[in-house]
Image (cartoon, helix red, strand yellow):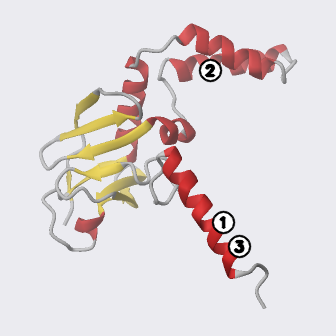
Amino acid sequence: ESIINRELWNNAQKLLESRNRQRGNTPCSVRYAFSGRVKCGGCTKSFVSRNRTGKTGKYKTWVCSNTLNGEKCTVRVSVRDAELHSMTRIVMSLIDIDREKLEKTILSAVFSLVKSEAQRADIRKVVNQLLRGEIISDSIIKQMVEAIFVYPDTHCELKLRGKDNVWTFERTNQQRTT
């Protein structure tokens, strides 16, 4: 005997699906910040992450799922996770927001919970780095990045949610995928 009946299960699934559509979420894995956000400029399929080991150690790279599955795709390159983070940091530092107002809002909320001056100083430093785009968290990427398109030449395009601009980047680590 099941814990809940089929009708309740189906209603819950419909509710979850409608919430995802309202938020603009894609039905993809949310394991990594860029999951479902890196798209192939050739076949429009999502890129998937793979762990690699190179001369400098282990790193994460993103590859077109069609290429990985041996299906037809013109984009046969991979992009390092670090490069995607770098692109996102640059764009976040360029977007037009009232950083001062945002900083005050964030700090007042956090400082209402934190009383230690030493902790407040550390938090202030991190918030400033976030607002300048020097560091970026996975949760910010998930909220802000709509898509990154990877093309067969040497460029990527990054689009933020709710913004008309598309930022173009030349890829630095041109790696062919077989």
Find residue 127 and name its label: 2
User: What's under tag 2, amino acid-wise?
Assistant: Val
The tag earlier along the polypeptide, 3 or 2, is: 3
Percent coordinates x, y for residue 110 in the rendering: 76, 22
Label 3, secondary structure: give it.
helix
Query: Residue visible at 71% across and 73% down?
Result: 8
31 up-or-down from 1: above or below: above
Q: Can I make out residue 14 in this image?
A: yes
Q: Can I make out residue 171 in this image?
A: no
- Disc 3 to disc 2, C-alpha distance: 43 Å
- Disc 1 to disc 3, C-alpha distance: 6 Å
Contact between labelled residues 3 and 1, with CB atoms less than 8 Å apart: yes
Would residue 10 be found to the left or right of residue 42 on screen?
Answer: right
Furthest toward the bottom, the residue is 1
Label 1, secondary structure: give it.
helix
Would residue 74 be found to the left or right of residue 124 on screen?
Answer: left
User: What's under tag 3, amino acid-wise?
Assistant: Leu
Q: Which residue is mark 1?
A: 12
Please identify, in this view, whether the residue under mark 3 or under mark 2 is nearer the observer. 3
